């Protein structure tokens, strides 16, 4: 028996989640696979393309239920994206599904040219993103994907925080005539939103209001910001928590409002501190002439520490405790 | 259109290609002239594609993987009425839609290409979509032989045979020269026919300037259940004596004197063709 993976949450963080009434959902990966299968059953033009990734993409049931709507390309990510683009150019709503690390590096040129430049309605789904693969090492991490795709014209970037956002992001992508990138992890995540929440690509969701520190977080780091805000509230600080599920196009209005109304801004992402959400927000604020104490929490420019995803998160301060400390120091 | 009429048209298209490159002050002369007869046959005999049906899902698809030979493609599309021939004078000019590689802003272009090794994977997606829809359209792509060093082509070669895409034809403009020199010196790829056969394709080797051979190889899929690879043996710079088989004309731009000389040769070729008719 191997040792169980370390938890993403300390006992204190778990207790805080319980206090907030948060319920553990499933992995966004599972939510994605179930959503895509539902959509594909209703629309035969929805095609999933996998690169020996139907298992890791949780698409084996999809392949069994809808064998004619799944195209397997083998371990060939460049081909995966080219084929996904060609399908999209011929009337299919194609979803290219592959680990984010390979999808957005090996086949970046195909994303740039075949999907974005040719402007076809393809969606690229980066699975097991960020440091989901933990101790498998940097070959399997995607800490660059937001940065490189932000610099490419004509693609939206969505990083869902919970099952609700994951489902909404996939449904929005299925309807969109434009290129989209959706990335998420493979660990189970807390549910942060009620089912009646409004989701719109490019429009952030404010989970908690406050005027001391604004946490602008994306993807599966949002929960840690929410827990930190709850912990800080017990210490008399009222913090705002924003789920910036869409990194591009960025909801600049919400970023500016946060910086104008709060005493400090902290961005949080499972990505390099270079070129991701943090620098995107910094550019918005600086160009608008808004100055505020500001920190980017993410993975620094170094060899990433070895460990499970939970270890890596904690090491770099992406945790309730870490974010509380960053906030307290910033306001000192 | 008879072979002779197409040959006469090819002289006209070579003229337009050279004039366009001269006007643009940039372009890919040698490869444009080597694939021009292939494009001429495709657009005038094979492809079910016209300005009128270009939005029809039933049309054939052509993706030019060797996107750099765009001036020849633009010349053929103008001749087929996709846009006025005067547009060719705007290639590469400020704010022109006519970029130095194919873009969908230009009527008649299916996909944006220019980075090599992209056309074949895209065409597999298009051919798969056709099979899914039980559509009768065919999908064609044109690759350079130097381009075959890009690994993505071989990922795609596997997939096309795996999916038995007999609605897909890849044409290789086998002019044996690339920007640095002979393909055999830069990165050997022979024997090409055996490679494609080994990957599960039906292969036809033709003279890429022979209208009868090209028409024969492109008219229908070579074999049921297999993608077709047409290796078209061509001459880089074909039709202009001082450009033929000279690597520096890969992206050489003719001077005014060179253009005049080239046009004189083409005029003489046309006169000869008309006399023989």
Image: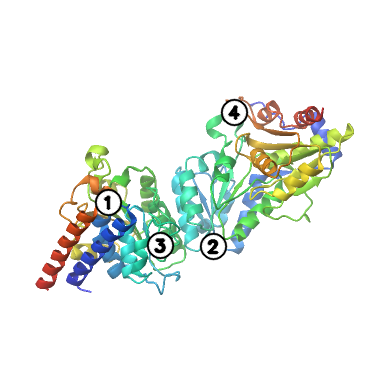
- Label 2 resides on the chain identified as A
Q: Earlier in the sequence, mark 4 or mark 2?
A: 2
The answer to which of A244 and A97 lies nearer the viewer is: A244
Q: Dividing the picture into quarters, in which one does residue A35 lie?
A: bottom right
The answer to which of A195 and A63 lies nearer the viewer is: A195
Give coordinates of residue A222: x percent, y percent: 73, 40
Q: Is residue A327 left or right of residue B76?
A: right
Give coordinates of residue A86: x percent, y percent: 45, 57
The residue pinned by badge 4 equals A301
- Label 4 resides on the chain identified as A
The colour scheme is rainbow
Q: At 37% from the left edge and 65% from the top edge, which residue is drawn?
A: B87
Give coordinates of residue B206: x percent, y percent: 20, 57
Q: CA distance from mark 3 to mark 4?
A: 42 Å
Q: Are marks 2 and 3 in contact (CB under 8 Å)?
A: no
Q: Is residue B92 left or right of residue B9?
A: right
**Residue B246 appears in the rendering:** yes
- Against A222, is A198 above or below? below
Q: Are marks 2 and 1 on the same chain?
A: no
* Disc nearest the viewer among 3 and 1: 1
The residue pinned by badge 3 equals B109
Q: Are marks 4 and 2 on the same chain?
A: yes
**Residue B173 appears in the rendering:** no
Q: Are marks 3 and 1 on the same chain?
A: yes
- Label 1 resides on the chain identified as B
Query: Are there few (<14), some (14-19), or many (20+) residues within 10 Å of tag 2?
Result: some
The residue pinned by badge 1 equals B253
């Amino acid at each position: 028996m191997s040792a169980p993976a370390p938890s993403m949450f300390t006992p204190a963080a778990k207790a805080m989640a319980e206090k907030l009434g948060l319920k553990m959902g499933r992995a966004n990966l599972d939510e994605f696979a179930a959503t895509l299968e539902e959509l594909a059953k209703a629309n035969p033009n929805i095609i999933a393309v996998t690169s020996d990734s139907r298992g890791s993409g949780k698409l084996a049931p999809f392949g069994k239920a809808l064998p004619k709507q799944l195209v397997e390309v083998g371990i060939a990510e460049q081909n995966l994206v080219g084929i996904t683009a060609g399908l999209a150019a011929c009337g299919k709503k194609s979803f290219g599904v592959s680990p984010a690390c390979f999808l957005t590096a090996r086949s970046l040129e195909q994303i740039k040219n075949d999907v974005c430049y040719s402007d076809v309605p393809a969606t690229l789904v980066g699975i097991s993103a960020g440091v989901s693969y933990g101790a498998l090492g940097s070959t399997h991490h995607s800490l660059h994907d937001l940065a490189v795709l932000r610099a490419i014209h004509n693609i939206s970037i969505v990083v869902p925080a919970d099952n609700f956002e994951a489902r909404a992001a996939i449904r929005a992508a299925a309807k969109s005539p434009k290129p989209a990138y959706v990335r998420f992890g493979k660990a189970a995540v807390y549910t942060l939103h009620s089912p009646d929440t409004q989701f719109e690509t490019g429009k952030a969701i404010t989970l908690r209001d406050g005027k001391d520190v604004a946490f602008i977080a994306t993807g599966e780091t949002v929960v840690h910001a929410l827990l930190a805000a709850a912990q800080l509230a017990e210490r008399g600080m009222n913090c705002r928590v924003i789920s910036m599920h869409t990194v591009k196009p960025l909801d600049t209005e919400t970023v500016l409002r946060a910086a104008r109304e709060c005493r400090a801004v902290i961005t949080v992402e499972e990505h390099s501190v270079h070129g991701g959400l943090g620098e995107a927000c910094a550019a918005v604020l600086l160009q608008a002439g808004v100055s505020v104490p500001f920190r980017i929490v993410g993975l620094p420019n170094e060899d990433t520490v070895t460990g499970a995803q939970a270890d890596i998160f904690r090491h770099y301060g992406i945790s309730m405790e870490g974010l509380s400390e960053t906030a307290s120091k910033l306001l000192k | 259109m008879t072979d002779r009429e197409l040959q006469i048209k090819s002289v006209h298209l070579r003229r337009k290609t050279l004039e366009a490159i001269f006007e643009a002050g940039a372009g890919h002369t040698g490869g444009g002239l080597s694939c021009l007869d292939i494009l001429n046959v495709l657009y005038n005999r094979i492809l079910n594609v016209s300005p009128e049906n270009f939005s029809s899902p039933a049309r054939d698809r052509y993706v030019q993987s060797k996107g750099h030979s765009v001036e020849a493609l633009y010349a053929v599309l103008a001749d087929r009425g996709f846009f006025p021939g005067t547009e060719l004078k705007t290639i590469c000019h400020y704010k022109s839609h006519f970029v130095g590689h194919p873009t969908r802003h230009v009527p008649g272009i299916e996909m944006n290409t220019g980075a090599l090794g992209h056309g074949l994977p895209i065409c597999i997606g298009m051919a798969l979509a056709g099979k899914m829809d039980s559509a009768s359209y065919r999908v064609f792509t044109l690759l350079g032989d130097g381009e075959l060093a890009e690994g993505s082509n071989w990922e795609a070669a596997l997939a096309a045979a795996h999916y038995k895409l007999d609605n897909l034809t890849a044409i290789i403009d086998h002019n044996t020269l690339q920007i640095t020199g002979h393909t055999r010196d830069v990165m050997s790829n022979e024997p090409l026919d055996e490679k494609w056969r080994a990957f599960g394709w039906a292969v036809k080797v033709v003279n890429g300037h022979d209208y009868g051979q090209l028409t024969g190889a492109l008219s229908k899929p070579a074999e049921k259940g297999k993608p077709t690879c047409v290796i078209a043996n061509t001459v880089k710079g074909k039709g202009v004596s001082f450009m033929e088989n000279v690597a520096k004309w890969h992206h050489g731009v003719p001077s005014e004197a060179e253009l005049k000389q080239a046009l004189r040769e083409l005029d003489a070729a046309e006169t000869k063709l008309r006399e023989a008719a």
